[in-house]
């Protein structure tokens, strides 16, 4: 159908070994100041084409439901897909090692220069840029979703539950997952259609 992405089975994914997975996820995580998700999308979907946009959304949704950081869960899933358990471990190590060392070094520097007005300005600017990246990422992911009033209603309820009512994520997911399945059962996922 026009406007739909090719199925995962139709796309040929490049095989990656443990070293490639480690360095790819190290690269992603070291670019991700203020949030790794936009860079992960850019590298995995746009540049390397390891995942389609649909696969990225599905793995991200699954990573959100599983315990732990969603981006680490995604790294493990992508690594496992390419090189089994060792690939999952390599991708996770790539996600964790660089930031761990950097945070330790930054913590030591912040301890001695943390009250500097220049540093406060830099951190404020980085926060604004990080917010912008997250908004752009959300819009890019939403652009590929089907246009249905039922989907929009579930998304709006999730936004209200988390942003307005300050409910815990697990409670919002526990309530809205069954509701979403009930409302959307039997519908064919055709991008761009409104119902």
Image (spheres, grey):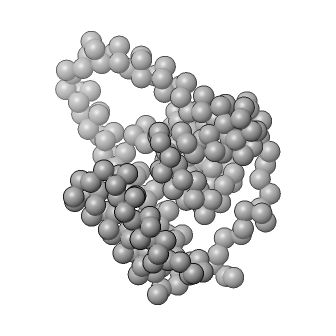
Q: Quadrant of residue 10?
A: bottom right
74 relative position to 133: left or right: right
Residue 54 lies, with reference to residue 27, above or below; the image says below
Name the residue furthest bottom: 195
Above or below for 97 versus 163:
above
Q: Quadrant of the N terminus?
A: bottom right
Residue at position x 40%, y 58% from top?
A: 173
Q: Is residue 58 visible?
A: yes
Q: Residue placed at 60% from the left, 63% from the top?
A: 54
Count of marks, rendered view: 0
Location of residue 157 (image quadrant): bottom left
Front position in the image: 28 or 67: 67
Give the x, y percent position of residue 130. Answer: 37, 45
Residue 194: image x %, image y %?
Answer: 48, 85
Q: Residue at x 55, y 24 (%)?
A: 97
Judged left or right of residue 161, residue 36 is right
Image height of 183 relative to 45, above or below: below
């Amino acid at each position: 159908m026009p406007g739909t992405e090719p199925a995962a089975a139709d796309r040929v994914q490049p095989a990656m070994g443990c070293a490639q997975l480690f360095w790819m996820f190290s690269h992603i995580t070291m670019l991700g100041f203020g949030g790794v998700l936009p860079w992960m999308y850019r590298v995995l979907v746009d540049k390397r084409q390891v995942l389609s946009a649909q696969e990225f959304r599905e793995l991200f949704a699954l990573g959100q439901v599983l315990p732990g950081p969603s981006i680490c869960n995604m790294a493990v899933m992508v690594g496992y897909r390419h090189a089994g358990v060792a690939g999952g471990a390599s991708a996770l190590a790539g996600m964790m090692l660089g930031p761990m060392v950097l945070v330790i070094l930054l913590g030591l520097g912040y301890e001695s220069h943390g009250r500097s007005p220049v540093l406060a300005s830099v951190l404020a600017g980085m926060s604004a840029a990080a917010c912008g990246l997250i908004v752009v990422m959300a819009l890019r992911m939403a652009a590929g979703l089907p246009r249905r009033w039922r989907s929009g209603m579930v998304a709006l309820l999730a936004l209200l539950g988390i942003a307005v009512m300050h409910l815990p994520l697990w409670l919002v997911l526990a309530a809205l997952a069954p509701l979403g399945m009930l409302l959307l059962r039997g519908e064919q996922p055709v991008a761009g259609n409104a119902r």
